[in-house]
Image (cartoon, rainbow, N blue to C red):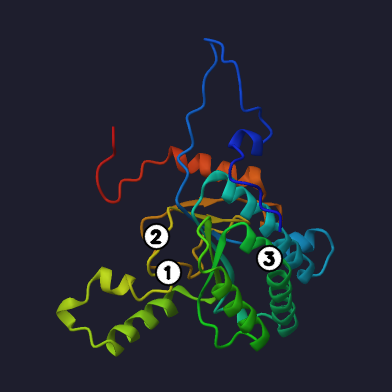
Amino acid sequence: MAIASPARSLGTLFGRTAAVTVKPTQVIAPALNVPVHVAIIMDGNGRWAKRRGMPRLAGHKAGTENLRRILTASVNMGIKVLTLYAFSTENWNRPADEVDGLMHLLESVLSKEIDELDRNGVQIRHIGQLERVPGQLQTRIRNAVERTKGNSKLILNVALNYGGRTEIVDAVKQLIADGVPVNQIDEAAIAQRLYTKGLPDPDLVVRTSGEYRTSNFLVWQSAYSEYYITDTYWPDFDESELHKAIEQYSKRDRRFGGLATK
């Protein structure tokens, strides 16, 4: 996976020249407010394939191949944490051949791309429960997490066998196991027992394919996230689409329950 050097500017990334002579009458676009943490619900692989008369697994393959573009764009734009919803706890209800094919795809991608990810400073983390994941994929995930734990260019959270409600239940179980007194249980105590402990909450949650639901994704962490919904299917969600999402985010006034800023 060839992740471009972060030294490249946004102008270079999106095909514009870096040095521009601005005439007095020109309108200068405001600088983007790049979110620290972007989370993406990668949806629409099956419909992308159906529109092309292809099997659903071909859509999943195209979706995994798209990861390279989004990782490259994220590094170039200065995003520090990227969380990708790869497989939910509910996705086990899909046909067995589709689930098996997707697991093999994920294993193949991780095997092929781990060297490039490591060289380019990407730290891989898994969020979710590994118990039900096939054994060989479990091993590859654990090895990738261990190998890249010292990297800091970009933290990549792979949400695999992940469910937001399950995550909260697991956090409550851990509170009980830790013997935390009732009067010491607060938001911070719960947050420190979530799968994402130590990471900032997502500033922006992107959902592809035009669906308007959160699908049990980062239920706790996204309480004040900005959402961006696009009709674009995940395999077609490229650098320019991510840029559009960041542009929209830059226009939002994040009030966190307070009043609008002037």
Residue 109 appears in view: yes
The three-letter code of the residue at mark 3 reads Asp
Q: Position of residue 249 (x, y in %)?
A: 47, 43
Q: Position of residue 127 (x, y in %)?
A: 50, 73
Locate residue 45: give its quadrant.
Answer: bottom right
Disc nearer the start of the sequence (2/1): 1
Q: Nearer the viewer, residue 155 or 246?
A: 155
Q: What residue type is labelled 2?
A: Asp
The reply to whether dot 2 and dot 1 touch (C-beta < 8 Å) is yes
**Where does label 3 land, which residue?**
115
Helix, strand or loop at label 2? It is loop
Name the residue rendered at 65%, 81% in the picture.
137
Q: Mark 1 points at which residue?
A: 196
| Mark 1 neighbour class, 10 Å CA radius: few under 14, some 14 to 19, many 20 or more | some
Q: How crowded is mark 2: few (under 14 residues within 10 Å), some or many (20 or more)?
A: many
- The residue beneath circle 2 is 201
